[in-house]
Every structure is written in C-alpha cells, then in structure tokens.
Image: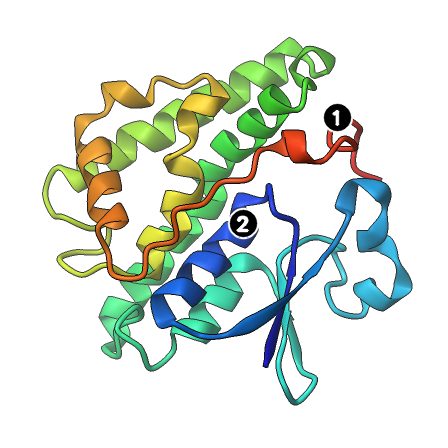
Amino acid sequence: MLTLFDYLPSQNAYKVRLLLSHLGLPYRTELVSIFEGAGHAPEYLAINPAGAVPAIRLDDGRVLAESNAILSFLAHGTRYLPADAFAAAKVQQWMSFEQDYVMNIAGLRHWTMTGKLARRPAALVEMRRAGGLRALQILERELSGHPFIAGDAYTIADIALFAYTHRADEAGLPLRDFAHIGAWIERVRAQPGFLDEHHPYAIDPHSSGELP
C-alpha cells in the first residue's frame, strides 16, 4: 500500500490527499512533525532531501517528493491528466503557475495563521500580498472563459491551484471579490470523491515557531 508522509495542516499535502480521494486509492499515513524537526531526521531526508511534506513511498520502496510531482505521477493514465501531449503541457503550465504565483498566498496564509506576520519585514509581507492578489486576478480572468483552469475538464492543475486558492481569505486576501474563482471553487467541490477536510495550524502547538 502507498504511504503518504503528511503534515495535516499543509495544503500541499492536502493536494495529494484530494487526488487520492478522487482516485479511491487506499494509502497509509505517516505524520511528520516538521516544526519539531522531524523533517530533518536522516531517515526522512532519505525520502525527501528538502525535509518537507508531502512525500510518498511506493510498495516497491521507491520514494517521490514535491506535491505537484506526486500529483503528476498518481494521475498518469487517469482522467485527471490528459493523454494528449499539448493538453498535458497546459496542465503543467498551470501547475508551474501555482508554484510561482499562488505560493505567495501560501506563505502569507501561513504567517497569518501562525502569528508570524509581525515578525516578517513589512516590505516582504507587502510583496507577498501583491503577489497573491496578482495570482487571484489572473485566475479570475482565466476562469471567466472556461469551467476549469486548463479548459473544459477538471485536472490535477485544478487540484494544485485549489489547495491554497480556496483558503486565500485566511491570508487576508478578499477572495469574495472574485466571482469566477468562487464559482470554480464550487465546481471543484462538486467533483466525485471530493475530500472536504481542513486541519488548522492550531492543532499543532509547535507551529507558531519557525521551521528548523
């Protein structure tokens, strides 16, 4: 059985849980206490050299890290990743966008929810906020023309983007002002096998500290 190395408040890890739920694949979970330094234990660094979550281990012992790489692997041969080369590349385009732009929302949200915002330089916070707003504006424009980000079909690009975009209000960003994103969020929630779960950082008393 596939093993998922997880930290429950992580939306990057939620991406993988969401796809596994869509696929109906069984898996076991190993929780990684990243704020207590467990990600930097030698045995975990052998699984993910960056010491972050998520990562997976296959039955044959092979390991894979980075959420979007995991999504691409698990979705291969399924409806969530097109077989056509160009369509698959469009999916990858938006997954790259997620890493380059939407992660501004992720960082801002993390600082806000764990009480770290005041510890960050004001210029850096403003840069993250501007980057997050730009990401939302781009998504709003794109989603005005088709139901899902890469076209008419729900793919792992939507899964990757959904994880942090639908929590943008927790970063102090005005998610309610983006009607097309709101409608897209509801379309994602309506997908078969959608996993409706959320774990706040408050479940981890160590999350208010800095990562080792």
Judging from the image, what secondary structure is the residue with disc 2 in? helix
In front: mark 2 or mark 1? 1
**Residue 106 sits above or below residue 189 on the image:** above
Indicate the quadrant containing the N terminus: top left, top right, bottom left or bottom right: bottom right
All told, the count of numbered labels is 2
Q: Is residue 11 left or right of residue 94?
A: right
**Whole-Å distance between the Cαs marked 2 and 1?**
18 Å
Q: Is residue 184 left or right of residue 128?
A: left
Q: Position of residue 62 (x, y in %)?
A: 67, 82
Residue 92 sits in quarter: bottom left
Earlier along the polypeptide chain: callout 2 or callout 1?
2
Q: Is residue 41 left or right of residue 115?
A: right
Residue drawn at the location 23% of the way across and 32% of the way down: 182
Tell me, yes or no, whether the two marked residues, 2 and 1, touch with CB atoms within 8 Å: no
Mark 2 surroundings: few (<14), some (14-19) or many (≥20) residues within 10 A = many
Residue drawn at the location 88% of the way across and 58% of the way down: 41
Q: Position of residue 154 (x, y in %)?
A: 23, 59
What's the coloring here?
rainbow
Disc on res. 68: none
Amino acid type at mark 1: Ser
Q: Position of residue 113 (x, y in %)?
A: 60, 23
**Residue 28 sits above or below residue 158 on the image:** below
Q: Position of residue 183 (x, y in %)?
A: 17, 36
Which one is in front, 197 or 140?
A: 197
Residue 134 sits in quarter: top left
Residue 116 sits in quarter: top right
Indicate the quadrant containing the C terminus: top left, top right, bottom left or bottom right: top right
Q: Which residue is mark 2?
A: 12
Q: Which residue is mark 1?
A: 208
**Residue 152 sits above or below residue 186 on the image:** below
